[in-house]
Amino acid sequence: MSNNLKYLEKQVEQLKDDGVYRELPINEGPCDNRISLDGKEVVNLSSNNYLGLATHPEVEQAAIDAVKNYGAGTGSVRTIVGNQAPLEALEILLAKFKREEAVTVFQSGLNCNIGAIQAIVNKGDLIISDELNHASIIDGVRLSRADKAIYKHSDMDNLEEILKERRDDYNNVLIITDGVFSMDGDLAKLPEIVKLAKKYNCLTYVDDAHGSGVLGENGRGTVDHFGLHGQVDFIIGTLSKAIGVIGGYVASKKVVKQWLLHRGRPLLFSTALPPAAIGAIIKSVELLMSSTEYTDKLWDNAKYFKAKLNTLGFDIGHSETPITPVMVGKEDLTMKFSKRLLEEGVFVSAIVFPTVPKGTGRLRCMISAAHTKDDLDFAIDKIQEVGKELGII
């Protein structure tokens, strides 16, 4: 090993000493309610595939058909020849689904945040961001030339204090929040944020990655859940979670789309989504728009799982969504909890620092419409068994 890389070797050893080093498991099949990890079947409580659409036969067939009609890849960025007809059709469909004027599709939700934020603010502007916003928002804010301020998590008094103190010093002020906070499952106080934005003449930006397909009518998201259509300037969604494929999008006014197609750097410098992904996404969205059965099953499973864990005495925080944290605290104990559950046939990710603050380690259980009650009962029994063994309950 090059002596220049010794510092990384030491840092990896420190991870091992701290008990937080992990080897990536290998999923040997599709992402479903039960998966094969390193040759062992386990109940999967760690997937963002909320509605089970990643393995829906019609979605799979739509991907195959798209490859036959449009090839394996687009061969270009959108601004050259990568803007294939299905991509345009997808944006029209998503705009209808979200009940917004326009949608701009990016290659991922992360690309939305690192591409859109730097494009819509500039020097002389201010970004005010919730302290628990997703890492991709943090990176997008860093890439912008705007000044930054952080408000305490969902603390509307603190947000207004910042606005009172600093609003008049800037051209534009952009308030950014997650719609659903991915580590705790709580909702942003979106109506209050919109009210403050109107009062202080600010723009609003909501990353609804974990709300899209989960909240609102037919899974239309947090904005629909709160009845705020037309009142949020930038709505970010992913196509890799509830939709079950890959990609992200910005729902907005048409002028925003026109600007992003000229200044959204991931669109200008990275190849467009492949036809297979687009075909599958279109079918997933059509299924979601046609029926509530997927979201109904998701919420039925989530309420069942949460009630059982509550009865057993686990601390599941203040989640308002199917994201169900099981609070542990110590990082090494959190990792041990996850490893023991895997040995017992349940895969649930340990979430520790730096993803969450030190001392707030937790297992993040991700409930899906694909889970059966047998899956959930098995997982609950094992969580109880190992939780007692480790002194967590």
Image (cartoon, helix red, strand yellow):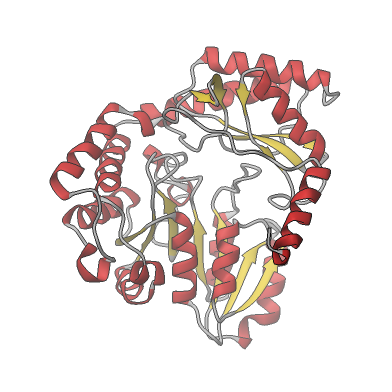
From the image, which quarter does the C terminus lie in? top right
| Left or right: 210 in relation to 167 | left
Q: Nearer the viewer, residue 231 or 353?
A: 353
| Left or right: 200 in relation to 156 | left
The number of numbered badges drawn on the structure is 0
Residue at 58% x, 85% y is: 170
Residue at 59% x, 47% y is: 187
Q: Quadrant of residue 56?
A: top left
Where does residue 325 sit, x and y in percent of width and height? 67, 35
Residue at 69% x, 23% y is: 341
Q: Quadrant of residue 338?
A: top right
Establish if 166 lies above or below 323.
Answer: below
Where does residue 63 sit, x and y in percent of width and height? 25, 39
Establish if 367 lies above or below 100.
Answer: above
Establish if 376 lies above or below 96.
Answer: above
| Left or right: 146 in relation to 13 | left
Where does residue 57 sit, x and y in percent of width and height? 28, 27
Where does residue 262 sit, x and y in percent of width and height? 32, 76
From the image, which quarter does the N terminus lie in? bottom right
Q: Quadrant of residue 242?
A: top left
Residue at far left of view: 69
Establish if 157 lies above or below 122.
Answer: above
Q: Nearer the viewer, residue 300 or 43?
A: 43
Residue at 44% x, 64% y is: 234
